[in-house]
Image (cartoon, coloured by chain):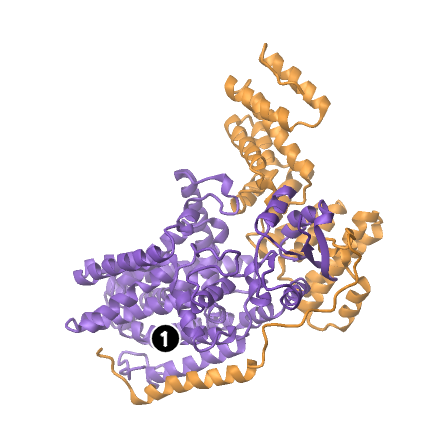
Amino acid sequence: MTPQAPHDKNAPGFFSSIPQATWVRVLIVLQLSLLAWEFYPDLSTNGDDARYYLLGQAMREGKGYRQIQLPNAPVETGYPIAFPLLLTIVSFVSSSIMVAKIFLALCGALTTLLCYFLFKNHLRRLLVPMLALWAVSSLMVEFSSSLMSEIPFLLFSILALVLYERSAADPKNAWLFWLTIAVSVVPMHCRSVGLAFSAAWILNTLVDKRYRFALAHVGMLAVTVVVFHVFTTWQNSYLLQLVQKNSYAPDLGYVTVADMLERIGQNIKAYGLSIVSQSLIPLPYAFPPFAKTIVSALCVALILTGWVRGFFGRMRFASLYVFLYFGILVMWQFQWSSERFVVGVLPFLYYFLLSGLDALMSLVVPAKDASLARKFTAGSEAPSRAGGIVVWAVVAIIGFFNVYNQPKDLHLKRYLGPDWRNFYSCADWVRINAPQDAVVMSRKPELFYVRAKRTGLVYPFTHNTQKIIDAIDSMRVSHVVLDNFAWTATSGEYLYPAIRSNPGRFKIAYALNNPPTVVYEVVKR
Amino acid sequence: MKMRLVSRDIAFYPLIFVIWTIIIVAMHGNHSYFGMPLPAMEVRQNDSDYYRPASGGFNMVQAQKALAGERNPKERARILEAIGIACFDKYRTERAPQYLDSAQRYVQEAVTSAPDVPGYYYNLARICTEKKDFASAKACYEKAAAVDPKNYMSYHNLGLLSYYEFKNPDMAKSYFEKALSIDTALPIDNYLLAEIALGKKDYSAAALHYGRELQLYAAGLSARATVMADQASLRLAATLSALELAMLYSSATPNEQLANSYFGAYLKLETDQQRRQNSINEFQKRHPGAGVPAP
């Protein structure tokens, strides 16, 4: 719920007659409008959301934390459990994809409300601009519209911080304390990068001398991690991926210290020069490169300023957390670096950006407070009308680029190319015509399973056709889908030669044109 | 919790969430994730020519009709590019220059309709390369890379253009390094980086890159990358890498054990009998008495 926020007496008179709580309501309505506009009831074609959905379904059906789309349903070793568990709970209402996506969208809106609770004591007149940026962020809309774990991760991170502030202010309330601790370990079980949240939590509570929060968090984390692994598996593919040179080419082996330093350098460059600024201010592709560079440099400079300000000010936790979060991101394999990973700390980055801008304005625009250092550290306490205008102008520009991007994203999400249409048609054909125990080899088995209701697997990425035939035989594959995806050539490169060199083993069961796509029935030896 | 609640908010947020949910369900409630399969094509069993990756089964008449009726610029661009690539494929089969001109025209139009799609620039660059208009090809690859900074294939091809056509090894080196920084499993790039290093007498860098090229091939990783190179080219890059490593360890940085080991790897890979014999002669000259396996 939104508390009635007191009017900021120091505000520059800019919209200050409207209470902040009213602003929040307006922003959440605006956010929900954007989410309604972007809403589409299907899964995306990336496959990750299908995997989350299927893990939720597996637990709903009492099959445990297993990949039910694969033959023999092996235990999931890659994805943390919190988000699939949430989807399991939602699936008791309805197992439809649309209901799960409605839940995710509402989580996005709830995050705005929680951001309000978290930042209202720290940001004052920058609070509404910051919430406005988050509410129209194209990344927020994108990830609140897909079944991915980024938004729940953010929701629980912020909820934990809000509860922490309440619990610290009410130390005798044991229920609140344990609720806070329980919520504080959820980010770690939602995304592996939540390790940064736990580390920041422990460090910050130790510095604050709130040792019981640190100890209880460590205890709760240890218990939940052990329980999770006892009931699933001790394997952790994320740790393996961190030390692998390239997970798509595992034979390359593991990184050396020099490789890791090189990777960190590449990632710092990528995040610093483009990914972070593009996440906050998604400039169109056609924007002149030099202008993009300037915007990017400005954005990073302001974020760094805000970060320093936060670290030495009242938002030390945010600064510490974002630092550790990016510390993990830059160690991640370079080919995966993208805007997606920034979503988990996006409101904090908007906070730093505005805080940096505020610091800059405090230095440039004359204010009552004379000390330069004081202006820098407490800019919002020495506001000016000009400063307010500049902040709102910047928010309007950033907001415009975020909203401007959304119709394009919408088209990309809703439009299925002919290759995907044919692939899904093959899934429909298999669902209607293949036996229940059919095992289908295809390029995207999780998406195929959702639509065809048949287990399946990907073909091995090898030019050795015998290995593919061996995989077909050993996994008792009954059907093979030879797709013609525009985004990858692997089926033509690996699967097609195997089929062509063993014509007696494959019988065309269903074929489509434009582009040619075939379902083969495997002839048993 | 000391949370100050405003009574109207207790009703406001649940209400707005419920209204939103009702609107979404009303808008999409009858959406079905499942569909009916599209009508199947009549295909003879064992018709191995039926399936052609990419544009092999492209229906030009249908595409032209779709183009005539399409008003959305992005969708038009997609169809234009598909027609252009079909023309390009036809050119590569029949070698008739008019197909190449048509391909260029269509893909250029696609670029004009949707200037934010890196793939269109990339394909236009391929067509320009085929027309030996290398300056335009370079500009298009650069544009593709600018639009999509992770487009390692553009950097790879820029490296090839710089090395073979513009004879600028320094420029080629920077492009190959950029491509490999995005995809470490790219074949051929390490081989050419090694050749560049060898040209500058930087033997340690040459040995490193030859070794990586060989390692990639040996692990079968080259197969993963979608480089427009056939298996013979990939094997040749690995073969020559093994040979150069054997020679490097024979002369520049002598190490008999490594030289023998790499020469053994070379002999396993080599398919050209003449080059094989020449290499054996050269190796035996550098290592008198070295045992060379029979072909």
Residue placed at 33% from the left, 75% from the top?
A: A116
Residue placed at 69% from the left, 36% from the top?
A: B232
Q: Position of residue A52 (x, y in %)?
A: 47, 64
Taking the view exactly as shown, the residue that stands out farthest to the top is B289
Q: Chain of mark 1?
A: A
The picture quadrant where one finds residue A361 is bottom left
Q: Position of residue A75 (x, y in %)?
A: 44, 56
Q: Position of residue A20 (x, y in %)?
A: 33, 82
Q: Circle 1 sits in a helix, a strand or a loop, which is it?
A: helix
The picture quadrant where one finds residue B167 is top right
The amino acid sitting under disc 1 is Gly
* In this view, A267 is above or below A168: above
Q: Nearer the viewer, residue A365 or A113?
A: A113
Q: Quickly name the residue at label 1.
A: A388
Q: Position of residue B166 (x, y in %)?
A: 67, 39
Taking the view exactly as shown, the residue that stands out farthest to the front is A525
Q: Nearer the viewer, residue A179 or A296?
A: A179
The picture quadrant where one finds residue A435 is bottom right
Q: What hue does chain A carry in this figure?
A: purple
Residue placed at 44% from the left, 82% from the top?
A: A29
* In this view, A297 is above or below A127: above
Q: Nearer the viewer, residue B286 or B25?
A: B25
* In this view, A339 is above or below A398: above
Q: Nearer the viewer, residue A333 or A286?
A: A333
Residue placed at 25% from the left, 82% from the top?
A: B4
Using residue A416 as the reference point, say whether residue A324 is left or right of it. Answer: left
Screen quadrant of the N terminus of chain B: bottom left
Could you say which chain is coloured orange in the image? B
